[in-house]
Image (cartoon, rainbow, N blue to C red):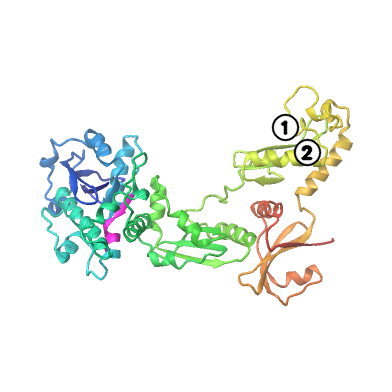
Amino acid sequence: MYAIIDLETTGGQPTQDRITEIAIYIHDGEKIVDEYATLLNPGRGIPPFITQLTGITNDMVSDAPKFHEVARKVVEMTEGCVFVAHNVRFDYSFLKKEFADLGYNYSRKTLCTVRLSRSLIPGQPSYSLGKLCQNIGIPLEGRHRAAGDAHATALLFGKLLKITSESEDLPHGTDASHTLARVDALAPSGQAASTKKPSPKRVAAVQTAIREALMPPLLPASVVANLPQATGVYYFHNEAGEVIYVGKSINIYKRIQQHFAIDVKSRKSLEFKNSIADITWELTGSELVALLYESHLIKHMKPAYNRAQRRSVFPAGIYLRIDEQGYKRLAYGRADARNAEIPIIALGNQYKAQGFLYHKVAKYNLCQKLCGLYKTQGACFDYQVHRCLGACVGQEPPESYNLRVDEAIDSISYEHESFVVIGPGRTELEKSIVLVENGRYRGFGYVDETFSARKLADFRDVIKEYTDNKDIQQIIRNHLRTKRKGERVKVFGN
């Protein structure tokens, strides 16, 4: 089922304007089966230019219901329906805002008849509702009134369905438009879809339109279609060409599709999405290089919509503390701005941090209790089974216990090491180089297959230097813990 909706409002901003009229036509894929329309009292004055456009005056809405009085009706009529409108973002954003003010999260799949018309009726001089209806012979009575515009949109929607059915080789008398409303992909949750075989071309057209309806309105679809399915960093630009967001991915195309695959909920997210007018990218070949370069770009460019590191991928970590008896204690916990301590290593979440610490305890014969993994007033469990040497009960002195803690820390940290990570390049004939010298990140670069190096200085000549910082250190530590396909680490003695 489809709910074809049109609104009239006091202006164009959902955050400050209000609805003055709403009309809903329910379409089952063949015909209109229900309808509803009413004026609404917006609770504020209607600007003169809006009255001139719509004909709706302050006197006309003074005794009309307020939105909260019709909200339940709107929810019930549109339940299980795809939300259809001509320029759907406008109408959908206004309704979501009105419901949000009532504390209700209104959420529907959306479909834009502007985008669908561009796909199925290409070459029109204009896709505004009035001119499009005039050019293709759809009657439009009551222009700029909700009922008139919604009814015309419903007729347009029916014509679009008919266009797709006429373009298919179907047996005489087959009504392909009926299948569209019944396809499993669009069937309301909990309701059975029709057993008729869906029209593949119709399904594809509507599903494409739904995806495109979630795309940023300023972003041409061709930009996304031309994105590479490769590793690198990408930039979102606004209309002025300014970079407003930087991201990275091992598959830029898929990651950006994920950005736009869901309907945004918050005001800030909607503002961000509506600002995106272009996407550019740089390939890196290596995932590690992409992570390091993304971090550098965010700090250097300070894009408006990147959060402070703006990193949030390492919210947990392993910490080192020394107790009153002189024992070095490893512990896991949060690794964010509320925790002033700097972790030895940061990890994806506290469950990963806990598992990581269990591994180090077992490998270096550390005490579960001193590492916060066994809550007890007495000896830890490992002591009872003779795997702990008794630091938990003071039997093993701090001096010998701390030596093993230091070994565990050395296995995590690269504080004094010099090494290069050699990974995939941007082409098959290229390799990426990430250089760490004496525990300090120096930068990255690229070499061809003929490059050979015998000493550390050979690698210094092929990299571009970048700034080292805490976030970079965490990225490298985290990356080194996992073996990556096509990568190798070459270590140099100091």
Q: Is residue 136 left or right of residue 239?
A: left
Front-most of residues 61 and 137? 137
* Residue 245 visible in rendering: no
Task: Give how far across and how far down residue 302 sits, in percent.
Answer: 52, 57
At label 1, the amino acid type is: Leu
The numbered dot on residue 361 is: 2
* Main SS category, magenta section: helix
Residue bounds of the magenta highlight: 110-117
Q: Is residue 227 above or below residue 319?
A: below
Instruction: Quadrant for the C terminus, please.
Output: bottom right
Q: Is residue 466 above or below residue 6?
A: below
Front-most of residues 71 and 187? 187
Task: Give how far across and how far down residue 491 sits, in percent.
Answer: 80, 61
**Alpha carbon separation for disc pair 1 and 2:** 9 Å
At label 2, the amino acid type is: Val
Kindly indicate whether the residue at mark 2 contacts the one at mark 1 (C-beta within 8 angstroms).
Answer: yes
Q: Quadrant of residue 479?
A: bottom right
Callout 1: SS: loop
Callout 2: SS: helix
Residue under the image location 61 percent in, 66 percent down: 285
Q: Which residue is mark 1?
A: 373
Residue under the image location 40 percent in, 67 percent down: 222
Q: Is residue 113 magenta?
A: yes
Q: Is residue 242 left or right of residue 187?
A: right
Q: Is residue 228 magenta?
A: no
Task: Give how far across and how far down residue 255 sits, in percent.
Answer: 50, 57
Q: Residues within 10 Å of mark 2 (few under 14, many from 20)?
A: many
Q: Is residue 403 left or right of residue 286?
A: right
Q: Residues within 10 Å of mark 1 (few under 14, many from 20)?
A: some
